[in-house]
Each structure stands twice: as structure tokens, then as C-alpha cells.
Image (spheres, rainbow, N blue to C red):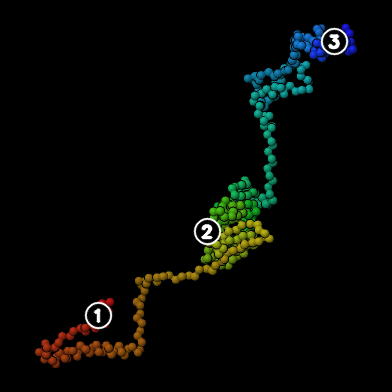
Amino acid sequence: MNCSAEKASRKWPDGAFRRGRAAMVTVASLLCLGMQAGPTLAARTPTFPWDDLFGTRPHRAHKAVRRSAVPLPKPRPAQAPPATEAPPATEVPAAAEPEAQPRAAPAAAGKPTETAKPTEAAKPAEPPPPQPSACRQALTEEIAIAPSIPDIHGAGGCGGEDLVRLEAIVLPDKRKVAVKPAAILRCKMASAVADWIRTDIAPLAERLGGGISNLDNFDSFECRGRNRVAGAQLSEHGRANALDVRAFGLASGKSISLTDRSVPRDLRETVLHSVCARFSTVLGPGSDWYHEDHVHLDLMERRNSYRICQWNVYDPLPQVAPLLPAERPEDAPPREVAAKSDAAKPDSSKAEHGKADEPDAAKSDDAAAPEGAAETRPHETKPQPTKKRRQSRRL
């Protein structure tokens, strides 16, 4: 068969077959390619090329897929030892499993009791606990009984970090001053209160007799505004940075109130100077009517280390005499009548003599007058009231 292009054009002249010229040339070209492919192509394609082109070539069956033998672990027996012990090795073909691979791994993977181990291993490791602050390390049990408590993060910024519960203060001589009730404070505030009691108040109480035994805590941590006013700025009590002190008790049982005016003035002034030197805010009587019965202490930080110390130490109240006199005792001697003056004595003697003479004169007149005259004598009448007296009576 001649497959040259020139003879192909001569064999198919122009005419009625012009429309199918392109298709027939293509078929002819395919026939030529099939004849020139050689014995290799003929061996692979026993049929004509166009059988596969038009879908007439029969489909050959696919070869069977060879599946490799994957060793599977045997089910765990009911009498298996507990999970802590090493599981028995399963029988696995030596050709499929290398010698270096441990045999316990496939058996361990099939255990239903150890399915939670991968999830536990997937959990992120917990962060290490935070290291205690320098204040927490300095506030030891030799200074105060103040265990740490978790941080508080409340609404509106209430709470704080590095908090302690101040239960008692340990004096240098190992005696404990109880804080009643225990105060929740920041570590720095608790340390300042402990230093104040140990350094200033304890020696002062020793001079009073018996020493200090407890501290009256009026208020410590409370999530509220200033002076408990709704909508006011957050108080330092809400930040656990303030303590209200009302009094401190002595070992003798006596209680000394810091705002009691019956307490000696010099004692209250000594306490005033000590707290104003240690705390940034001191509010007591005279600051406002919210602090008339206690003293407010806090460590609020302000610009340029500004401090507020408002506590008026009033003078003691005057002693008021009782309204009613004391009752006269029964065994008291009779009261002496006050003696009259000398100028009043003659007049009184004359009056006494006149009164004494009047009965005698009346008797003498009755004796001298006749019996008929005594009957005709008009009877003595009382003086009639005057008009002025009548008017006064009517009023």
C-alpha cells in the first residue's frame, strides 16, 4: 500500500468526495502508522487499531490484586493479667515483622482498657505553680499567721492577687495577737499591719498593763464602693487593701477604743502619729460621719506619694453633775434653821409683845363694859375685798 502524501492526493481528486476528504485522510494516516509500527506493536495489539478507536476492542479482565498479609493481634483473653503487667507477646510471622520491632506494641494497641492513654498524653502539660512573691516569703509564721488564699477576680475590678487571710500577729516574745475576725488582705497590707502592731502598739499596751491580746477588725475585704454608696468609686476595701480598726483588747480584759473620748488624749494622739507614719490613708473622727466609730487604714498609691491623715483627737467630755440631788440618809442629824439677823430681832419682839397684849386688853375691855353693852357691840367682821381684788379674782 502506497502511503505517500502525493499519491494520496492524486488518488482522491476533488469532486463529490471533497466533504469527506479530511476524514478519509486521517483514516489513511492511521492505517499507514499501523503498518509501519513493526512486530512489537503487532504483538501487543493482535487486532486492528481502529477496533480500539471506535470501542469495538474487547475489554481484558484486570489482574487480581495481591493483598499483603498484615499481622493482626489476637483478641485479649478474659484471663489476661492486669494492665500494669507486661502483656504476653502474640504470635506474628517472622517474615512480616522485623526482629528489632518489639512484639508488645501490637498487643498493647488492642487493649480496650488503655484507650484513654493517647488522649491523656495529648493534653497540654499544666503550667508550673507560680513562685511566691517576695512579700509572701518575708511574711513567715514567726511574724504572722497568714495563710495564702487564691486570687479573687470579681465584678467591677474587685479582688486582687497575692492575698492572705490574716488570723493572728506573732509578737517578738512569741505571744499571738488574734485578729477578730480574720482579715482578708493583700500581702503588703497584712505585712504593714503586723509591723505596726509588733513595733508600736505592743510596747504601748505593755505600759497600760497586761499587753495587747487581740485586734478588733471592723471591716477588711468587701466588694463595694466608697462609704457603701451605690455607684461610687471602688473602695480600697474592694481591692483588699484596707482595714478598719475599732479597738484593741488587753490581756487584762479591758478594751481600748480608738475613738472613745474617755480614753486619755495622749494615748489616742500616740496611736494617731504611728498610723499616719505607716499608712497612706488614715480616716477617723472628724473626716466624715462615716468614720466616727472606727479608724480606716489603707495603702492606696497616689501621685508623688501623697498621703491623707484626717483624724481629730477630741478632748474628753466634761463630767456633768447629776440632775437630782442624792437622798438624805435616815440617820442624818436634823437640819439647823438659819439664825435671824440682829436688825430683825427687835421688830419681831415687838410683834410678839403686841400679840401677847391683845388678849389681855380684850379681857379688860370686856370686864369694864356692862353686860348690855356687850350685847349691843357690833360683831367683828372680816374686811371686805376691794374692787381690785374682785377684778383679780374674776380674771
The one of 329 and 79 positioned closer to us in this rendering: 79
Q: Is residue 354 above or below residue 116?
A: below
Q: Is residue 200 above or below residue 142?
A: below
Instruction: Return the residue found at the far bottom.
Output: 368
Q: Which mark is residue 390?
A: 1
Report x, y in % for residue 25: 83, 13
Viewer can see residue 318: yes
Distance from disc 3 to disc 2, alpha carbons, whole Å, reads 137 Å
Which residue is rendered at x = 68% and y = 25% of the image?
85
Report x, y in % for residue 39: 87, 8
Q: Which of marks 2 and 1 is nearer the N terminus?
A: 2
Q: Where does label 2 land, which residue?
A: 253
- For this view, does 21 lie left or right of residue 318? right
Element carrying mark 1 = helix
Q: In which quarter of the image is the C terminus?
A: bottom left
Report x, y in % for residue 361: 19, 90
Q: Which of marks 1 and 3 is nearer the N terminus?
A: 3
